[in-house]
Image (spheres, rainbow, N blue to C red):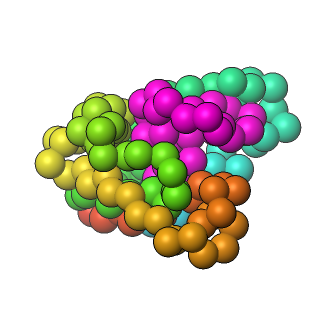
Amino acid sequence: MMLGGIVVTSDRGVIGTSDADVALHALMDALLGAAAMGDIGEMFPSGDPAWAGAASLEMLGLVTDRIRGAGYRIGNVDLTIVCEKVRVAPHRHAMRVAISEALSTDVAAVSVKATTTDGLGHLGLDEGIAAHAIVLLYSDA
């Protein structure tokens, strides 16, 4: 499965139009939302065959270009992956590097962390995965 732009070995996976990288999709939505530019469903419609199998890292690059084109600078990003069994820690640095490269920003401005729900709910039963992202944008306007 793709997670944070990195292939993470898991006996589970996710289904999506693109490579379904849950972490990067949350980050793209946070970036677009912070700039009041809609969401990834508007920018990359799931019904559009052009996005079938698309790499989320490349999509993140397009979102970054749109954000910068609108006069914003990325201050920092904070990404939290919520999953019960997938181990993020061994991949954290590689994820930070991949994300920072897609954002054209310093790796020090990218935080990636993970948590579990300690067995609670669908995520705790390992029936899904979620991600939350917070971004700081500066306006050049």
Q: Is residue 27 visible?
A: yes
- Asked if the magenta segment contains residue 63, the reply would be no
Tell me where residue 61 sits by quadrant.
top left
Which residue occupies 81% across, 26% down? Answer: 49
- Is residue 116 depicted above or below 14 in this figure? below
* Image quadrant occupied by the N terminus: top right
Q: Position of residue 67 (x, y in %)?
A: 43, 49
The reply to whether residue 139 is visible in this rendering is no
Question: With 82 as the anchor, is 109 left or right in this view?
Answer: left
Residues 82 and 43: in front is 82
Residue 7: x %, y % from top left = 47, 28
Compared across the picture, whether 104 is left or right of 40 comes to left
Where does the magenta region start and end? 1-30
Left or right? Give the position of 4 relative to 75.
right
At horizontal 41% and vertical 64% (from top left) the residue drawn is 115
Q: Is residue 29 magenta?
A: yes
